[in-house]
Amino acid sequence: MSQITATPTAGSVAVPVVPLLKLGTWVVFFGLLAMLAIFFVSSDQGAVSLFAGNGVHEWVHDARHLLGYPCH
Amino acid sequence: MSTASKDKSVLTPGAFLIRGLAAGLIAGLLAFIVAFAFGEPYVDDAIALEEAAAAQAPADEHPADHADEDEAGMVEISRDNQKSWGLLTGTLAIGTALGGLVALATAAVVGRLGNLSARGSTALVALIGFVAIALVPFTKYPATPPAVGSGETIGGRTASYFALQLVSVLAAIAMVVVANKLRGRFEAWTAATIAALGYVVIVAVTAFLLPTVNEIGSFPADTLWYFRRSSLIVLATLWATIGVILVALVGRLHDRAIADANRRQLAASI
């Protein structure tokens, strides 16, 4: 994505936008964190296991089913 | 002037993220309540069917309680814990994660989608998120209750599900960029329609190419439908709550950014 600056929307005042470059680092770091959280709820100890056993799977079992992730 | 006001703006990635996390947390809580009230009865029904089938199977390793994989060294979590704290953990984690991601996606588009307001942009991101992340994967790989699905195919089913979800999300992002580019050449609605059509074609072809899963067996159709319906309601609750709360929070944040910009311009003109 390129740095596109928005045209003023309200009146003649330039409405600030979030610089994409600055946003990028946040997306990378939070993206990884969010992926990890989603992985544990959706997939760990199912198709792939990061931790041995079934504790994570069993604990989030109902959420995994009801949020539509393949469970077992 | 515009660069100076950009630097001091309250519209920072962090400001968006914190609002997304808050919206996601509330959404996770509401999703839990809906899931507990409308989804759990069918999870219980499905587990009862699973246990009945296991009890009929001759001298199998299945104990009388719910167990997925039969390996040694497994922990036992009671159904009461699974359907309350376990379910809550899952919905809060997913809600917060998705809330944060939606907020960061919103941060990328606010002020960049033509005349669409900050509130409108936020609502659009949440709506696209629901369709791309929840609804489209559901159409090919709908939620399945316990007792449906063979343990041997979990790897393939998981890969297919996430493949469709990944393609869907990437296509949605790409088509938003395309729509935004086409806006210069066509009317906004025409641009949006062309992009939406492009998205539909991409996910339809992907879904068609991915393998079909049919492991329902003799599972009762009514329980299956009730379970899937409740799952869809849970997902809709999650996304709608993220959308509604984030629209309010981002809207107010953006109002403040405009007020700041106005004030700064006024100060500069004096």
Image (cartoon, coloured by chain):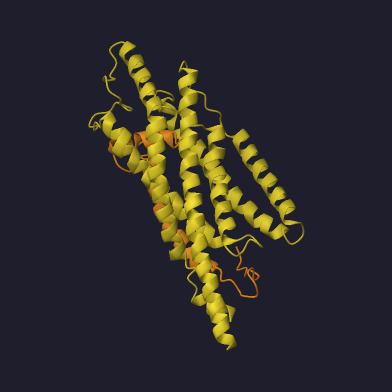
Screen quadrant of the N terminus of chain B: bottom right
Q: Residue A44 sits in which quadrant?
A: top left
Q: Residue B221: give x, y in percent of width and height.
A: 50, 19
What shade does chain A have? Answer: orange
Say which of B49 and B207 sits in front: B49
Camera sees residue B123: yes
Foreground residue among A4 and A43: A4
Relative vertical location of residue B197 with respect to residue B66 in this rendering, above or below: below
Can you say whether B180 is above or below B7 in the image? above
- Seen in the image, is B158 located left or right of residue A20? left
Horizontal arrangement in the rendering, residue B153 relative to residue B173 (left or right): left
Instruction: Where is residue B32? Give x, y as percent.
Output: 38, 39
* Residue that appears at 38% across and 48% down: A37
Query: Residue B63 appears in which quarter of the rendering?
Result: top left
**The quarter of the displayed image where residue B120 is located:** bottom right
Q: In this view of the protein, can residue A58 be seen by the observer? A: no
For the image, the number of numbered tags is 0
Q: Which residue appears at 37% of the width and 47% of the height? A: B93
In the displayed structure, B66 sits above or below B167; it is above
Using the image, determine if residue B122 lies above or below residue A67. Answer: below
Taking the spot 55% from the left edge, 39% from the top edge, the residue there is B135
For the residue pair B179 and B32, the one nearer the viewer reads as B32
Q: Which chain is yellow?
A: B
Horizontal and vertical percent for residue A28? 45, 59
User: Which image quarter holds the C terminus of chain B?
Assistant: bottom right
Direction bottom: furthest residue:
B270
Residue B202: x %, y % from top left: 65, 43
| Image-based side of B77 in relation to B22, left or right | left
Q: Residue at x 45, y 28 (%)?
A: B153
